[in-house]
Image: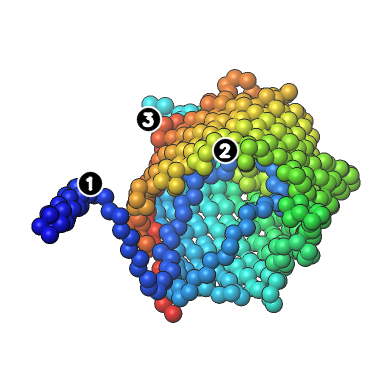
């Protein structure tokens, strides 16, 4: 009996040592199962920050000249992988922000203001309004007491832009949307492309003695050399909300706008457009699909000027050109574009002609352009290659031209540009955060828009249009890194080769952007841009080889502090390189600008 008791005690002692050893090693062989009700919840989602974009390096010259040809597709095929729907029960409606204000002030007395209002949550109706304003009331250069005819004193380069839009969207039934908006735009500029030196050299043409040059300059009113545009537009449309196969879809729109200028010229335009599409499956496999489309639009323009008012109006620092305004000018452009898209065995095919009938260049002409492309992804979407060709006709209306060059004469020669574009593009996804885009284009330009000084103005500070033919080869790429919206880096550039040198077109451009989001409280954005030397055009359209407009380079920096969900502060610096670059001949920029402001968002009442 004692022997058995001794053996039992030994076993218990050994087991206790083993348990102690397990506790020291933090080894457990137990499991705990807890049962209870599960309440799925979604945390509040903060707004995603958009990737940084290149902005202009001077707010005083806010009209960008587009050096590249951007292509736009009416529709695009995209088929995400299907996932099971998740059911969320009892999620309360979050509070909405329906009013947004942004106010700021910069150097050169440059105020800015933005205000947005949006209706609250509704399944059937959405309406709102927004207004924005930006202006600058500074000067370029200063008077030099030692040099009465300074070539650095350009004087007032005021500008002002104001836009107001009211919009509404309504859902009728289950699958029809009706949308409309009404907008007004005021664009005010000065023909400031002259200095005291050019005034002195042109005294005899202007009818003033040399000794009166400075006095004449000081007596000038901004009304004497202003360029102001007003535009009123209405848009309306109806479209189908069907997005799946087997349903007929449509999108029909109309737009009427009227543009009038300070020089009593007007442009009334009408745009009617429609898109019809139908999707279907190719065979039994859901991965093979097809779409058929039909796009058509009609653009109509009426340009006119009031002869007696033109004759009585003082031209900006020069002579008024003789303008034939006896009869209004009418022009039309009609586009018809049927095409098909297929997704078959991993290939995406797009094919269809674009047929254009136009009398924008006086006589009626018919054009046919290609619109074909093929795209294929490899290595599980890591590599995508696209090869294509397309073309089109661009109507260079007065409204389109003044957005490119605000210092254009308001009775400019209006013609159309025809272009054919052939391209090869490649996208490489090294990871979810790292991507490379490279590509090349060959562009054939016929009657492309360009600008030269108008000889009717003594100081050559007003531009007229001229049109030229050339071919261009473009090669470039972009390397981007995105780390969950906390860090975004983008570096890219393009090289251009022209068969014929063209004014105001650079040989290369490059840019780099860095965006940092620190805990969604501090947002930083640093940008840099470089643009090669460009030629300017002389009055006869020939290139001015010496001097060239200098190489443009700029550095911009912006920081924003978000105090809370409703209030934030921002500070923006442009052209930190302190460069006096030129957009157009005789039109220099400000050296550096900054803007400081605040944004405030008003919460709606809880329901």
Q: Which mark is residue 145?
A: 3
Tell me the CA gap for discs 3 and 2: 61 Å
Residue 154 in sight in this render: no
Residue shown at 50%/68% (left/top)?
A: 117
Q: Is residue 59 left or right of residue 343?
A: left
The nearer-to-camera label among 3 and 2 is 2
Q: Secondary structure at mark 3?
A: loop
Q: Is residue 28 left or right of residue 175?
A: left
Residue 144 versus residue 258 in the image, above or below? above
Tell me the CA gap for discs 1 and 3: 89 Å
Disc 1: which residue: 25
Residue 514 versus residue 2 in the image, above or below? above
Q: Is residue 294 left or right of residue 161?
A: right
Q: Nearer the viewer, residue 433 or 292?
A: 433
Extreme residue in the front direction: 1
Q: Secondary structure at mark 1?
A: loop
Residue 483's x, y, as percent?
44, 43
Residue shown at 74%/43% (left/top)?
A: 347
Alpha-carbon neighbours of circle 3 within 10 Å: few (<14), some, or many (≥20)?
Answer: few
Mark positioned earlier in the residue sequence (3 or 2) = 3
Check the picture and name the quadrant holding the C terminus. bottom left
Extreme residue in the left direction: 2
Q: Nearer the viewer, residue 247 or 569?
A: 247
The nearer-to-camera label among 1 and 3 is 1
Extreme residue in the bottom direction: 607
Q: Which mark is residue 429?
A: 2
The nearer-to-camera label among 2 and 1 is 1
Residue 6 in sight in this render: yes
């Amino acid at each position: 009996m004692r022997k058995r008791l001794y053996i039992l005690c030994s076993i218990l002692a050994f087991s206790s040592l083993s348990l102690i050893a397990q506790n020291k090693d933090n080894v457990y062989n137990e499991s705990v199962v807890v049962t209870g009700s599960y309440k799925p919840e979604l945390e509040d989602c903060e707004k995603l920050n958009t990737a940084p974009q290149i902005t202009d390096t001077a707010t005083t010259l806010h009209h960008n000249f587009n050096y590249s040809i951007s292509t736009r597709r009416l529709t695009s095929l995209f088929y995400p992988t299907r996932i099971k729907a998740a059911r969320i029960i009892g999620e309360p409606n979050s509070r909405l922000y329906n009013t947004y204000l942004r106010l700021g002030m910069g150097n050169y007395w440059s105020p800015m203001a933005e205000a947005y209002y949006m209706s609250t949550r509704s399944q059937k109706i959405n309406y709102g309004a927004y207004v924005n304003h930006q202006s600058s009331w500074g000067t370029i250069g200063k008077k030099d007491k030692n040099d009465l005819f300074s070539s650095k004193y350009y004087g007032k380069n005021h500008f002002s832009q104001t836009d107001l839009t009211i919009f509404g969207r309504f859902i009728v039934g289950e699958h029809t949307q009706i949308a409309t908006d009404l907008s007004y735009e005021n664009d005010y500029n000065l023909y400031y492309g002259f200095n005291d030196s050019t005034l002195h050299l042109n005294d005899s043409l202007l009818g003033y003695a040399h000794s009166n040059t400075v006095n004449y300059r000081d007596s000038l009113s901004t009304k004497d050399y202003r360029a102001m545009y007003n535009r009123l537009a209405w848009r309306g449309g109806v479209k189908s909300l069907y997005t799946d196969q087997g349903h007929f879809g449509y999108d029909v729109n109309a737009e009427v706008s009227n543009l009038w200028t300070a020089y009593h010229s007007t442009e009334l335009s009408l745009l009617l457009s429609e898109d019809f599409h139908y999707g279907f499956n190719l065979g039994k496999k859901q991965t093979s699909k097809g779409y058929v489309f039909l796009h058509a639009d009609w653009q109509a323009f009426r340009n006119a000027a009031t002869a007696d008012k033109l004759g009585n109006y003082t031209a900006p620092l020069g002579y008024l050109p003789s303008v034939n305004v006896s009869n209004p000018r009418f022009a039309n452009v009609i586009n018809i574009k049927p095409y098909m898209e297929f997704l078959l065995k991993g290939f995406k095919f797009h094919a269809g002609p674009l047929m254009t009938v136009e009398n924008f260049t006086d006589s009626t002409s018919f054009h046919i352009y290609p619109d074909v492309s093929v795209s294929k992804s490899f290595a599980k979407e890591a590599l995508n290659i696209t090869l294509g060709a397309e073309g089109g006709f661009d109507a260079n209306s007065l409204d389109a031209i003044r957005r490119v060059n605000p210092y254009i004469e308001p009775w400019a020669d209006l013609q159309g540009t025809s272009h054919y574009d052939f391209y090869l593009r490649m996208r490489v996804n090294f990871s979810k955060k790292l991507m490379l885009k490279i590509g090349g284009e060959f562009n054939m330009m016929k009657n492309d828009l360009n600008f030269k000084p108008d000889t009717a103005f003594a100081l050559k500070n007003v531009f007229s249009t001229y049109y030229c033919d050339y071919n261009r080869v473009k090669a470039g790429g972009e390397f981007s890194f995105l780390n969950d919206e906390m860090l975004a880096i983008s570096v890219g550039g393009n090289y251009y080769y022209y068969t014929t040198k063209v004014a105001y077109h650079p040989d290369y451009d490059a840019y780099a952007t860095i965006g940092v989001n620190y805990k969604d409280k501090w947002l930083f954005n640093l940008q840099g841009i470089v643009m090669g030397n460009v030629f300017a055009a002389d009055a006869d359209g020939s290139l001015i080889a010496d001097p060239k407009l200098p190489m443009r380079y700029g550095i911009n920096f912006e920081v924003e502090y978000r105090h809370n969900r409703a209030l934030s502060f921002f500070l923006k610096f442009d052209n930190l390189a302190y460069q006096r670059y030129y957009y157009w001949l005789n039109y220099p920029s400000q050296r550096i600008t900054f803007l400081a402001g605040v944004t405030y968002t008003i919460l709606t009442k809880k329901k």
